[in-house]
């Protein structure tokens, strides 16, 4: 399930890829890296030209940032276990319970909103521990384990809410978590930016991040090099759960209503964003900025299609097709690069075998 997102599957290796002196060759090599970024910009320009009255407006930008901030946080949450080669489906199931719990703790039990938020985050982190233990101690495949625990947590959400909406007066401080603005933009976008920068710094510039990527590339090699695979994978699931819990709090603050029918529609876009992220910026390597680009292209594409009058089923159709295309592109690019590397290794081997029999080598060997 996770073999398509090996940590370093498509990263360039100058010693094997060879030089790219031609403009066409450079363009071909740059497309897997920046192709999705270019496509995102192209889609934005296309819809801006076709829908000049509605798409390229500050109102539309605010709407996209407000609506997609929760999905972006869930996509970043899913990215963390993916770096280690695991999948966490509870990012979509868990947000159902977390946003209901954030509201019910205040409206039913009268807890102050900071305490309610703290309890939600603690529960989400604890659920991450459960997922990590099932995957590492019980050795259950991460897809199966998180599908099972996600279904359980969704059932708990249904039981807790009784299948009805959870409503009530919420304090202004809690509503302001998602309702505020900063520099004229929704505050949720800045939460996403802060989380993305923090994850980028950790994953790219710290030993912890390098250890996570090594585990994702080859857990046995990581174990032989003294990296505690179990501890790191467990920590990845805890971080994923904590971030999905925060996304639930943000969703509760924005909707101000808790209901079990809200949340599951975030699962597929979050996973699509993370998978798309593995095809850009650092192709073949799950990465933070690639994930945000993946979420951006989904947000722009769906917004533009809906403004054209797309039917209600357009969004899930677009998400599903984009997921299939992104994984297909990643697999095709990986096969192309593997063939190129094998060819260059064979050429080097032939050159090495021919070198001892060259006239220059024979002259050097003669007394």
Image (cartoon, rainbow, N blue to C red):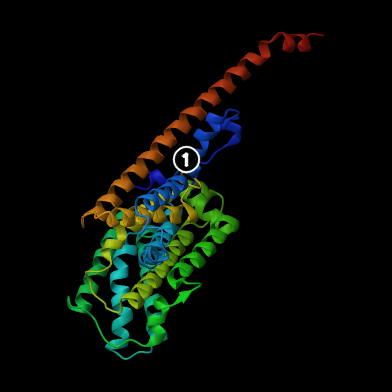
Residue 337 percent across, percent down from the top left: 48, 33
Q: Residue at x 50, y 43 (%)?
A: 33
In terms of depth relative to the viewer, which is nearer, 94 or 306? Answer: 306
Q: Residue at x 39, y 44 (%)?
A: 3
In which quarter of the view is residue 123 placed?
A: bottom left
Residue 105 percent across, percent down from the top left: 31, 85
Residue 364 percent across, percent down from the top left: 78, 12
Furthest residue to the right? 367
Residue 248 percent across, percent down from the top left: 35, 72
Instruction: Specify whether 22 is left or right of 366.
Output: left
* Image quarter hosting the C terminus: top right
Residue holding disc 1: 32
Instruction: Specify whether 195 is left or right of 361.
Output: left
| Label 1 element class | helix
In which quarter of the view is residue 234 placed?
A: bottom left
In the rendered view, tell whether residue 331 sits above or below residue 307.
Answer: above
In which quarter of the view is residue 365 placed?
A: top right
For label 1, the crowd category at 10 Å Cα-Cα, with few meaning under 14, some 14 to 19 and many 20 or more, is many
In terms of depth relative to the viewer, which is nearer, 45 or 254? Answer: 45
Instruction: Specify whether 158 is left or right of 102.
Output: left
In terms of depth relative to the viewer, which is nearer, 135 or 13? Answer: 13
Q: Residue at x 55, y 33 (%)?
A: 26
């Amino acid at each position: 399930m996770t073999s398509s997102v090996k940590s370093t599957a498509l990263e360039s290796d100058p010693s094997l890829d060879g030089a790219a002196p031609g403009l066409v060759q450079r363009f071909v090599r740059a497309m897997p890296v920046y192709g999705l970024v270019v496509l995102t910009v192209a889609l934005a320009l296309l819809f801006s030209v076709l829908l000049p009255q509605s798409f390229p407006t500050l109102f539309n930008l605010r709407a996209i940032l407000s609506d997609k901030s929760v999905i972006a946080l869930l996509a970043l949450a899913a990215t963390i276990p993916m770096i280690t080669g695991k999948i966490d489906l509870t990012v979509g199931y868990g947000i159902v319970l977390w946003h209901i719990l954030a509201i019910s703790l205040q409206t039913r039990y009268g807890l102050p909103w900071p305490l309610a938020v703290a309890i939600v985050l603690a529960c989400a982190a604890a659920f991450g521990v459960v997922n990590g233990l099932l995957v590492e101690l019980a050795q259950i495949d991460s897809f199966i384990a998180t599908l099972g625990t996600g279904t359980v947590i969704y059932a708990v959400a249904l039981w807790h809410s009784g299948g009805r909406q959870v409503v009530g007066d919420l304090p202004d401080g809690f509503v302001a978590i998602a309702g505020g603005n900063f520099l004229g933009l929704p505050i949720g976008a800045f939460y996403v930016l802060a989380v993305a920068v923090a994850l980028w710094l950790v994953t790219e510039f710290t030993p912890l991040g390098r250890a996570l990527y090594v585990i994702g590339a080859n857990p046995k090699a990581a174990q032989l090099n003294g990296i505690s695979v179990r501890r790191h994978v467990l920590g990845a699931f805890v971080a994923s759960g904590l971030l999905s819990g925060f996304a639930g709090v943000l969703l509760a603050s924005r909707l101000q209503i808790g209901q079990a029918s809200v949340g599951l529609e975030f699962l597929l876009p979050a996973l699509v964003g993370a998978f798309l992220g593995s095809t850009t910026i650092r192709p073949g390597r799950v990465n933070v900025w690639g994930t945000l680009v993946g979420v951006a292209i989904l947000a722009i594409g769906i917004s533009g299609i809906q403004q054209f009058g797309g039917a209600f089923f357009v969004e899930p159709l677009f998400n599903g097709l984009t997921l299939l295309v992104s994984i297909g592109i990643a697999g095709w690019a990986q096969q192309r690069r593997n063939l190129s590397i094998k060819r260059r290794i064979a050429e080097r081997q032939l050159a090495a075998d021919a070198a001892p029999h060259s006239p220059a080598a024979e002259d050097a060997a003669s007394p």
